[in-house]
Image (cartoon, grey):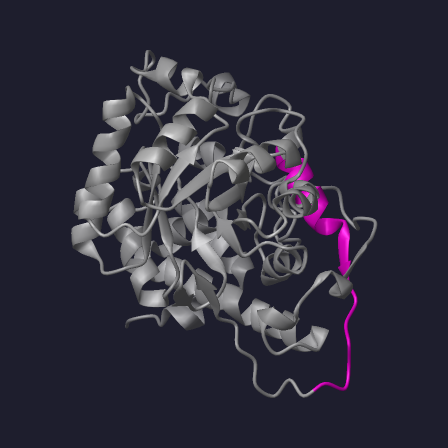
Amino acid sequence: MTIDIADQFQTLHEIVKFARLALPQGPWDYLMGGTETETTVKRNRQALDSVAFRPRVLRDVSKIDCSAIMFGKRIRMPVFLAPIGSIETFAEGGGVTAAKASEEFGIPQILSSACNPGLEAVARAADNFRIYQLYVRGDAAFVDDHVHRAVDNGYTAFCLTVDTALYSRRERDIAKRFIKPWRNRNPVGMEYQAALNWDDVKRFKDKHDLPLILKGIATGEDAVQACELGVEVIYVSNHGGRQLDHGRGSLDVLPEVVKAVDGRARVIMDGGCMRGSDVVKAIALGADAVGIGRLACLGLGAAGQEGLVRTLELLEDEVRISLGLLGVTAFEELDASHVHSAQPVDAPHVFSAFPLLDFNDGY
């Protein structure tokens, strides 16, 4: 008998639990881990848990619109699939499977250049809203080649990741001697990423018409510099806590960046967002859209394309309820007056948003 996936997964807790049971230990540790002490991972969650809601009541919320506009396109909610290297580790088909879920549900996918089967194959597989993200592994001609290929294959925008000048020490993997099968011990071209600088951003803007996103902005100062060069989207991110240890949580960084940008560019973010309430908090504090990375991998790990779509459906339901109980009917009505600083209730953990699961028992 076929099990209906909506019956099988009625909460995000169940998605996480099923993914844990389905994934081998190595990929699971890679998914949940971060750099060295994993302080930045915890601060992502702590930042989200340090915000409380200020609901308004007696508003007509009988009709709620969870949709948003991104690059002039209407999307089902202001959420996108964050770029994830080697997403094929979590579901057969990798980037293609995620792209099909993106098309089916109706939100954008940012495809990582470290993801198989590559930008052309992913573009052929789905008619989705897609953006391409590049790790720089070559000279200017290397970058230009990827831009042209992205344009030719219908990618709406181009994303450069700027917080990976050096590859961090993921000690959860090192301690268990987990050698990621997708990563060479001596990767080629890392020196180009290390040398990436503002002159390269200027060259990109001077040469290409494709909108540019800079992923990994963590200060107002860098946001200002990006705006002065004409960058269209500032992407607040700390790589899910996988790069610089002891960084700030993304939601703590967000207001600083929004203030510095001052409307000159769009601002998007990722970093620990696991629940609909997380999305609503980020939008209230000025983000235009929120990326999900680990949560997307959990959906894929639980049940492939169906699992990711179901994860997004549950997330959307949480978003809709949060909006309605705050007294708003659309994201346009949401602002900083709907949130307030608060003390976290629980100690932060990469999955502390799921208290029904015992993460000390093999998680």
Residue nearer the viewer, 68 or 42? 68
- Percent position (x, y) of residue 65? 53, 77
Is 48 colored magenta in this rendering? Answer: yes
Numbered range of the magenta stretch: 41-59
Displayed quadrant of residue 312: bottom left
Residue nearer the viewer, 249 or 274? 249
Horizontal side of residue 350 vs 177, given as left or right: right
Examine the rendered structure and indicate whether residue 114 appears above or below residue 12: above
Please name the residue shown 51% across and 20% down the image. 168
The C terminus sits in image quarter: top right
Displayed quadrant of residue 4: bottom left
Q: Is residue 54 visible?
A: yes
Residue nearer the viewer, 237 or 25? 237
Examine the rendered structure and indicate whether residue 26 appears above or below residue 282: above
Is 155 colored magenta in this rendering? Answer: no
- Percent position (x, y) of residue 302? 40, 53
Please name the residue shown 32% across and 59% down the image. 101
Please name the residue shown 42% across and 54% down the image. 299
Horizontal side of residue 131 vs 150, given as left or right: right
Please name the residue shown 61% across and 88% down the image. 62
Horizontal side of residue 183 vs 316, given as left or right: left
- Percent position (x, y) of residue 194? 43, 16
- Percent position (x, y) of residue 109? 36, 52
The N terminus sits in image quarter: bottom left
Q: Is residue 117 visible?
A: no
Q: How many marks?
A: 0
